[in-house]
Image (tube, rainbow, N blue to C red):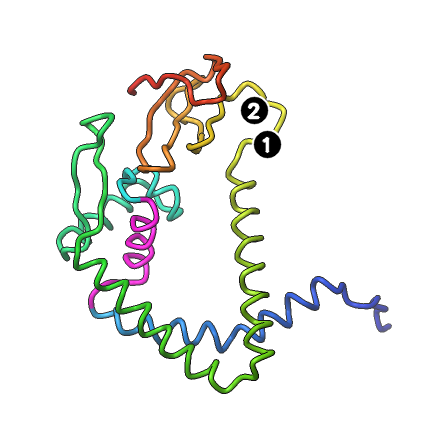
């Protein structure tokens, strides 16, 4: 007996249509990345891009953002240092921590990747109507803004148990899994971590005085 199905969910239909329509864009992205394949792997390129975004990030937070085990991220960084893509130096707030920075070679690699990607995009855009180009740019910008906002909400504290967690306008809080009752604050300006007591209150709205772990 055939099953009866209701009308497709509009959001699901839109997601499926976008998934199909984005195939050419993803192919273009991958084609541009192939030019860097001889120098860095896909995972290494992701790490380079994260370090570009969070200059001075430490190894623990890099591993978290890449979804890797700390040991795997450490080996990845070893290979990038050997390839001349990353530099390591002691952290500003804790000399025992290692801060990661891109080398000039890594920045040249990213510039080449983006130039190739933009050249390929320009060829396709040239064949589109002006209205189509404008609509595409508007939609992609809104998509990017929405995705970034949702990612920020996902990573930010949001439950009742987080009411006593300190908050800062220029940082990102995360629990320290090895030290209950403590939290790690990452300065958005420099990517460095400081561990603080989550039970200390701050009346100014700024992050409380940090205690180096």
Residue shown at the point (28%, 46%) measured from the top left: 73
Residue 167 vertical position relative to residue 18 in the rendered view, above or below: above
Image quadrant in which the N terminus is located: bottom right
In the depicted view, which residue is nearer to us: 189 or 76? Answer: 189
| Disc 2 crowd, CA 10 A, few/some/many (<14, 14-19, 20+) | few
Marks counted in the figure total 2
What is the quadrant of residue 83 in the picture?
A: bottom left
The front one of 157 and 72 is 157
Residue at the limit of the structure toward the front, as seen here: 130
Q: Are the two marked residues, 2 and 1, in contact with CB atoms closer than 8 angstroms?
A: yes
Does the magenta-highlighted stretch encompass residue 49? yes
Which is nearer the eye, 75 or 1?
75
Left or right: 104 in relation to 132: left
For image coordinates 64% across by 69% down, the residue present is 16
Name which residue lies at 59% across and 65% down.
139
Which percent across, then down, holds residue 190? 31, 37
- Identified at 55% across, 47% down, the residue is 149
212 vs 143: above or below: above
In the displayed image of the protein, which residue is found farthest to the bottom? 127
Q: CA distance from mark 2 to mark 1?
A: 6 Å
Q: Position of residue 101 (x, y in %)?
A: 22, 46
Q: Which mark is residue 162?
A: 2
Expressed as whole percent of the image width and height from the top left, the position of residue 8 reads: 77, 67
Dominant SS in magenta: helix
- Mark on residue 158? 1
Q: Is residue 90 left or right of residue 54?
A: left
Image side of residue 67 versus residue 132, left or right: left
Please check the rendered image and state whether residue 123 is part of the magenta-colored stretch, yes or no.
Answer: no
Magenta range: 39-54
Q: Neighbour class for label 1 at 10 Å: few (<14), some, many (≥20)?
A: few
């Amino acid at each position: 007996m055939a099953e009866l199905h209701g009308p497709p969910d509009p959001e699901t239909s839109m997601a499926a249509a976008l998934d199909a329509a984005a195939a050419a864009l993803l192919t273009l992205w991958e084609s541009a990345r192939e030019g860097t394949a001889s120098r860095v792997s896909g995972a290494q390129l992701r790490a380079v891009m994260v370090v570009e975004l969070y200059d001075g990030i430490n190894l623990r937070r890099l591993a978290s953002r890449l979804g890797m085990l700390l040991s795997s991220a450490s080996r990845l960084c070893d290979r990038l240092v050997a390839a001349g893509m990353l530099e390591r130096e002691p952290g500003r707030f804790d000399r025992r921590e290692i801060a990661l920075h891109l080398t000039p070679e890594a920045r040249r690699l990213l510039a080449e990747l983006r130039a190739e990607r933009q050249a390929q995009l320009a060829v396709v855009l040239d064949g589109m109507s002006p209205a189509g180009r404008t609509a595409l740019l508007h939609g992609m910008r809104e998509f990017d803004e929405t995705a970034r906002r949702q990612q920020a909400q996902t990573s930010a504290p949001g439950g009742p148990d987080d009411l006593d967690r300190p908050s800062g306008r220029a940082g990102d809080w995360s629990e320290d899994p090895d030290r209950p009752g403590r939290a790690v604050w990452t300065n958005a300006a420099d990517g460095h971590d400081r561990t603080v007591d989550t039970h200390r209150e701050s009346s100014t709205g700024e992050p409380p005085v940090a205690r180096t772990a």
